[in-house]
Image: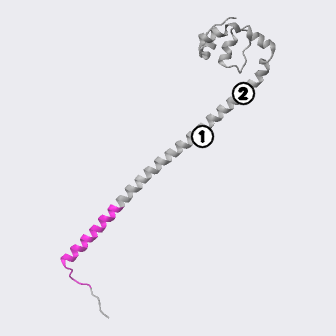
Amino acid sequence: MLNAQAIPYVPTATRDSRIHQSRERNESLAYLKMADRERSLRLDTDRKAREVIRIQLLWRGYKTRTDTCSLFKEKQHWTARRKKDAHRRSMRTYSFDCCLGKGPLLESDTPRETVLKRVPTWAHQTLLDVVKDRYVQQATSVLFFR
């Protein structure tokens, strides 16, 4: 068996080579750590952007569903009211009053029906020519025969 002893003298070129290799290894490790840190930051930023978009999508979906549901309920209520008022509309006294321009306003009347109820039947065509699809404005602002 050979006895291994420490060499008291290491040539300068060998020592410089080892120092150079150690420095290169440290620099490459530092570069890899920096590149990994940059990559994780970039991935973190991308992930946060995707999460923000996901939250926005969820919120918009919820908002749309609630709005649609409230519109549907409103339409159902109006349709039910319209059906109830259909019985009153079918009565002779109501029809006669509407012909004379004195028909009572019902809760489910459309703006067009509201405007036309305020004038006698023989003036409907003249009124339609004047109003021309501005029923909502005319229902509140124009004075009719009464």
* Placement of the C terminus among the 4 image quadrants: top right
Q: Is residue 27 above or below residue 107?
A: below
Q: Of the numbered discs in the image, which one, if any, rests on residue 79?
A: 2
- Kind of residue at badge 1: Tyr
Residue 12 figure quarter: bottom left
Q: Residue at x 65, y 10 (%)?
A: 125
- Kind of residue at badge 2: Thr
> Is residue 120 among what the camera can see?
no
Helix, strand or loop at mark 2: helix
Q: CA distance from mark 1 to mark 2?
A: 26 Å
> Is residue 127 among what the camera can see?
yes
In the rendered image, residue 67 lying in the magenta stretch gets the answer: no
Where is residue 94 drawn, in percent x and y? 78, 13
Q: Residue at x 27, y 87 (%)?
A: 5
Residue 102 figure quarter: top right
Closest to the observer, 123 or 145: 123
Question: Given the current orientation, which residue lies at the most extreme right position?
Answer: 92
Closest to the observer, 44 or 64: 64
Residue assigned mark 1: 62
Q: Residue at x 79, y 21 (%)?
A: 87
Q: Residue at x 62, y 16 (%)?
A: 135
Q: Which residues are magenta?
A: 6-32
